[in-house]
Image (spheres, rainbow, N blue to C red):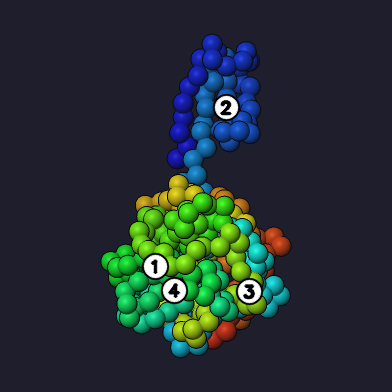
Amino acid sequence: MSTLTTHTTASRDSHSIGLCKFNTTSKAIEVSDGTSWLVYDYDSAISNITSTRSLSFDGSNDYVSFAGDADLALSGASAATLAGWINVSNTTTNQHLCGANANPFSGELWGSTNVIYLEMGVSTFFKANNYRTYITQGDWHHIAFVFDGSGSTNAERAKIYVDGTSLSGTYTGTMPTTIPSITNWYLGKGSYNVYYNGLMDEMALWVGTALSASQISSLYGSGSLGTGVVNSPELYSPNHFWRFEETSGTTASNEISGGQDGTINGATPGNTSVP
């Protein structure tokens, strides 16, 4: 619920009973009772959505492509964030959650070595160890890959979050200041021809924006708010948002005006397991 606080007239401008205004800075609604302002502070946790379906990937040849805008303007971007919910069917195999040619902005779950990667190009990556400690097979988890080319160090430029927590790890190479050129970028596969095996839901992509730790934490919240009820990425204005609410067909609809719909290749829509 929103937080209610009161402020006396001494700390606010003069007002009349019943006056109501919207504070564009704090996003609070302020109502006067003639003596005090009753301030209903903005609370992002109430901006939630209910998922009823997820998209199922078989780990063999399933993926989502974006033919109308194949790289989703990621090429040359100075920042990017991918965040959403996953339920991995097999944590011992090597898989791409997202990926591209030569691996720019590629998120990988590497079961054979028990690590999670965010690759930013050939031999340039962040590696978080103990993958299976953070992501348990058959359970829903929130994951986020964040690139920020404005950072002065590798640790500031590439981050991975699971369930709202920033993972520690090691870096190989120097993280770039912009994302290298991408021909095609996908959900569910990458340049190593390994595919995601599990469920995916409520995936959002920000191009040109690196979400902060507090924003990622807000998206995760304390996990699912109930069956299928999660905090909405639209709180932070993503460029693309695929909810995977489809029950059939080959189109993954984008919820954002001007965003690119995805083409479902082999994956099965309509799975009723949700975060």
Q: Are marks 1 and 2 in contact (CB under 8 Å)?
A: no
Q: Residue furthest bottom?
A: 60
Q: Earlier in the sequence, mark 4 or mark 3?
A: 4
User: Residue 237's x, y, as percent?
Assistant: 61, 53
Q: Earlier in the sequence, mark 2 or mark 3?
A: 2
In the picture of the structure, the residue carrying the numbered disc 2 is 30
Q: Earlier in the sequence, mark 1 or mark 2?
A: 2
Residue found 51% across the figure and 63% down from its top: 175
Residues under labels 2 and 3: Cα distance? Answer: 47 Å
Quarter holding the N terminus is: top left
Q: How many marks?
A: 4
Amino acid, disc 4: Glu
User: Residue 128's x, y, as percent?
Assistant: 36, 65
Q: Is residue 20 above or below residue 213?
A: above
Residue found 47% across the figure and 58% down from its top: 154
In the picture of the structure, the residue carrying the numbered disc 1 is 127
Quarter holding the C terminus is: bottom left
Element carrying mark 1: strand
Residues 79 and 207: in front is: 79
Residues under labels 3 and 1: Cα distance? Answer: 21 Å
User: On the picture, is 62 further left or further right than 240?
Assistant: left
User: On the picture, is 253 further left or further right than 130?
Assistant: right
Residues under labels 2 and 4: Cα distance? Answer: 46 Å
Residues under labels 4 and 3: Cα distance? Answer: 17 Å
Q: Are marks 4 and 1 in contact (CB under 8 Å)?
A: no
Q: Give residue 178's quadrant in the image.
A: bottom right
Could you say which disc has been placed on residue 182 in the image?
3
Could you say which disc has been placed on residue 108 in the image?
4
Residues 64 and 123: in front is: 123
